[in-house]
């Protein structure tokens, strides 16, 4: 489980090849080396506990569990299933929104394309446009806009 290099390094410093090497290190260093030698043993316990919990969650060795442990495992599994379902629903919702957004963008480009085609067709030289422009002298323009005089009232008899 642990790297071979780690154990070899610890052995090298805990069991020096010659007895004279042990006198080179002060007592504090020896204590520190001895403390680090126990690290793999200390780490093995939590790892074993985690493996045991993992096996229980997978359904192995449930016969030795108490009722409370089984209920706790059930609650953990329900929470996990609910979170997985929620993530799935969120992913589907996001995909639907992306698809909807893509369709709206496509519609917008289609509308822009149609509008640009409509503008191109209306601005073509063959199309006729009616305007109120009048070409001519200013007098004719002003006389044309004058309304005819109102009818005369009837003559008295």
Image (cartoon, rainbow, N blue to C red):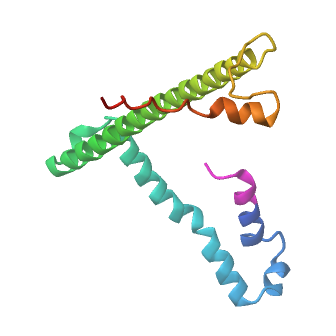
Q: Residue at x 55, y 29 (%)?
A: 148
Q: Residue 65, position in %: x, y? A: 22, 45
92 w.r.t. 128: above or below: below
Q: Residue at x 25, y 39 (%)?
A: 62
Query: Which quarter of the rendering shows the C terminus?
Result: top left
70 w.r.t. 94: above or below: below
Q: Residue at x 74, y 69 (%)?
A: 15
Residue toward you, 119 or 111: 119
Residue toward you, 122 or 92: 122
Q: Residue at x 83, y 69 (%)?
A: 17
| Extreme residue in the left direction | 67
92 w.r.t. 35: above or below: above
Q: Is residue 104 left or right of residue 128?
A: left
Question: Would you say residue 2 is visible in this rendering?
Answer: yes
Q: Is residue 86 left or right of residue 18?
A: left
64 w.r.t. 137: above or below: below
């Amino acid at each position: 489980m642990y790297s071979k290099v780690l154990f070899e390094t610890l052995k090298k410093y805990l069991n020096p090849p010659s007895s004279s090497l042990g006198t080179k290190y002060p007592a504090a260093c020896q204590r520190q080396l001895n403390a680090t030698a126990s690290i793999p043993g200390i780490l093995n316990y939590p790892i074993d506990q985690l493996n045991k919990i993992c096996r229980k969650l997978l359904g192995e060795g449930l016969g030795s569990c108490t009722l409370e442990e089984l209920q706790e495992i059930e609650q953990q599994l329900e929470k996990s299933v609910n979170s997985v379902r929620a993530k799935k629903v969120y992913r589907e919702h996001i995909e639907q929104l992306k698809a909807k957004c893509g369709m709206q963008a496509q519609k917008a480009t289609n509308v822009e394309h149609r509008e640009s085609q409509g503008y191109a067709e209306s601005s073509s030289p063959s199309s006729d446009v009616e305007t109120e422009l009048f070409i001519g002298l200013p007098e004719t323009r002003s006389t044309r806009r004058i309304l005819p005089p109102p009818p005369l009232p009837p003559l008295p008899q």
